[in-house]
Image: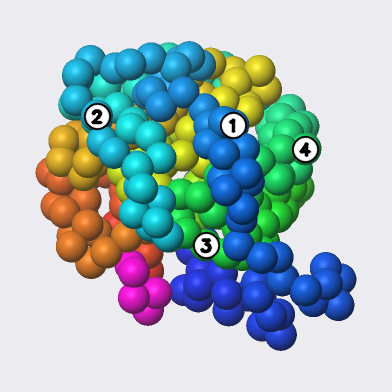
């Protein structure tokens, strides 16, 4: 699998827009959400649990992490503080689900990703409200993030059906060479606090389109739309294909990076986080894709063969 990571922030892609939206198409920027809108967003939250093997579960630990609205400083909810055992359970579920998922045709993957996009689009208002509540973004910016997430799944639904490779040929006498693209297996994903839903989409869509399964750790500060995404796609994506484990970098991120059954780790985060993930993955020669917070570098190690 090949993943391309942009070296520009989402705002750069929106050159010429004001307030995160196209004013000519959408009119004046939306005002800050009312208390009623905030209440609606909170009411629409997914269970604040781990999402493993298609179901929400409290996980193995009893601790929790407060999730705060940065605009007000108020606690929105508390999510489970994941453990290394939670990661082990999620990776086991992803590994068990991968052979059947990887055996599907590009058409089947494409149809499922289109269904995911349709479901997100149908719930765009609720997702935008929740994203604004959890990140403190203006509603118009959150709405644009949701729209971009929908477009990401639609794009990869098509791109997954158009992958090409070098032609088969007899490059050595008496031997026919063929390049066959195969899924890596289980991919670990670590996403940042600032674009939780959009970054999840950027990672999930290409990984799933290529036939891999996923264990995703969202930022402990902004996990709510990622959990909502999992809830929305439960009846679309087979159990175990997408797993979400909430918690701190240590132990969740560190265990995910070092797990022997994780073939690749994709991270968007700080220089410190990228260095820690690379160090954890290096002893088992697993691949890493890292996009730093400075948005000035992308780095990858050789992928597992």
> Which region of the structure is painted magenta?
292-296
First along the sequence among labels 4 and 1: 1
Image spot of residue 13 (x, y percent): 63, 75
Residue 70 in the image: above or below residue 246: below
Camera-nearest residue between 235 and 103: 235
Camera-nearest residue between 22 and 39: 39
Nearer the observer: mark 2 or 4; the answer is: 2
Q: Residue beneath label 1, please?
A: 44
Camera-nearest residue between 79 and 51: 79
- At a point 40% along the width and 51% down the height, the residue shown is 69
Q: Residue beneath label 3, please?
A: 137
Assign a secondary structure to mark 1: loop
First along the sequence among labels 4 and 3: 4
Q: CA distance from mark 4 to mark 1?
A: 14 Å
293 drawn magenta: yes
First along the sequence among labels 2 and 4: 2
Left or right, residue 107 beside residue 273: right
Asked if residue 84 shows in the view, the reply is yes
Q: Which mark is residue 64?
A: 2
Circle 4 Cα neighbour tier, 10 Å, few/some/many (<14 / 14–19 / ≥20)? few
Circle 2 Cα neighbour tier, 10 Å, few/some/many (<14 / 14–19 / ≥20)? some
First along the sequence among labels 2 and 3: 2
Asked if residue 114 shows in the view, the reply is no
Q: CA distance from mark 2 to mark 4?
A: 31 Å
- At a point 63% along the width and 46% down the height, the residue shown is 37
Q: CA distance from mark 2 to mark 3?
A: 24 Å
């Amino acid at each position: 699998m090949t993943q391309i990571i942009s070296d520009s922030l989402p705002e750069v892609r929106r050159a010429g827009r004001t307030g995160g939206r196209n004013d000519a198409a959408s009119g004046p920027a939306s005002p800050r959400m009312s208390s009623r809108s905030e209440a609606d967003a909170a009411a629409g939250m997914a269970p604040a649990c781990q999402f493993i093997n298609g179901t929400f579960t409290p996980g193995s630990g009893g601790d929790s992490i407060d999730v705060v609205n940065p605009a007000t400083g108020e606690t929105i909810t508390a999510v489970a503080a994941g453990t290394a055992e939670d990661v082990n359970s999620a990776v086991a579920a992803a590994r068990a689900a991968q052979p059947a998922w990887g055996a599907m045709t590009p058409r089947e993957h494409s149809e499922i990703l289109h269904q995911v996009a349709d479901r997100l689009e149908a719930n765009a208002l609720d997702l935008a409200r929740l994203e604004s509540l959890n990140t403190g973004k203006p509603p118009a910016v959150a709405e644009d993030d949701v729209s971009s997430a929908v477009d990401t799944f639609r794009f990869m639904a098509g791109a997954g059906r158009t992958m090409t490779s070098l032609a088969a040929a007899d490059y050595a006498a008496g031997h026919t060479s063929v390049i066959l693209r195969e899924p890596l297996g289980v991919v670990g994903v670590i996403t940042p606090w600032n674009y939780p839903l959009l970054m999840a989409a950027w990672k999930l869509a290409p990984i799933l389109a290529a036939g891999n399964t996923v264990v995703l750790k969202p930022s402990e500060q902004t996990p709510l739309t990622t959990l909502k995404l999992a809830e929305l796609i439960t009846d679309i994506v087979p159990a175990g294909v997408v797993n979400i484990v909430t918690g701190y970098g240590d132990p969740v991120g560190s265990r995910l990076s070092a797990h022997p059954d994780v073939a690749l780790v994709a991270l968007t985060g700080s220089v410190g986080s990228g260095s820690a993930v690379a160090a954890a993955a290096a002893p088992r020669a697993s691949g890493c894709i890292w996009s730093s917070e400075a948005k000035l570098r992308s780095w990858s190690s050789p992928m597992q063969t």
